[in-house]
Image: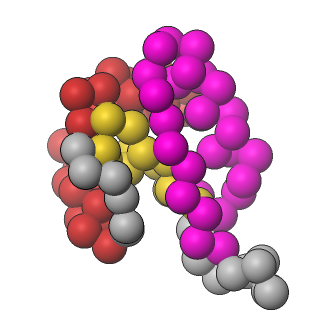
Amino acid sequence: MMKLLQKWKKLQKKVKKKPNWVTVFQTTDEYMVHIYKLKLEDNNIPVSIFNQIDSSYNAFGYIYLSVPLKDEKNALELINNENE
C-alpha cells in the first residue's frame, strides 16, 4: 500500500490538478476511469477526470482520476478492493 501511495504522490507533481485534490488512479483505458468514477461516486466521494490522451493518435498520454485530499485514503481502499 505504501508503494502505491508513493507512486501517486510523484504523479501528483506531474499532473495539473485542483488545489487540495490528489490523483488516485491513472490509466490509458477510458472505460476503467469511468468504472472507478461510478464506484467512488456511489460512496459519496467527489471525482474529477483529467484526460491527457492525445486526441490525434489516441496512443499517447494518460487519463487521471482525482479526489479531494480528505477522501484519498477511502478512494484508494475502494480502488484496491476492486482490483482484488
**Residue 48 seen anywhere in this rendered image of the structure:** yes
Whole-percent x, y for residue 15 in the image: 37, 68
Position of the N terminus by quadrant: top left
Instruction: Find the residue positioned furthest to the front.
Output: 19
Q: Is residue 79 magenta?
A: no
Whole-percent x, y for residue 34 in the image: 69, 39
The count of marks equals 0
Q: Nearer the viewer, residue 29 or 55?
A: 55
Q: Residue at x 60, y 63 (%)?
A: 51
Instruction: Find the residue positioned furthest to the top.
Output: 43
Q: Residue at x 34, y 53 (%)?
A: 18
Q: Is residue 40 magenta?
A: yes
Left or right of 32? Residue 44 is left
Quarter of the image holding residue 61? bottom right
**Residue 7 seen anywhere in this rendered image of the structure:** no
Left or right of 4? Residue 43 is right
Q: Which residues are magenta?
A: 27-53
Whole-percent x, y for residue 26 in the image: 50, 56
Q: From the viewer's perspective, is residue 54 above or below residue 5? A: below
Q: Nearer the viewer, residue 84 or 56?
A: 56
Q: Residue at x 39, y 37 (%)?
A: 67
Colour scheme employed for the rendering of this structure: secondary structure
Whole-percent x, y for residue 52 in the image: 58, 72
Q: Residue at x 32, y 73 (%)?
A: 14
Q: From the viewer's perspective, is residue 74 above or below residue 83? A: above
Q: From the viewer's perspective, is residue 28 above or below residue 14? A: above
Instruction: Find the residue positioned furthest to the bottom.
Output: 56
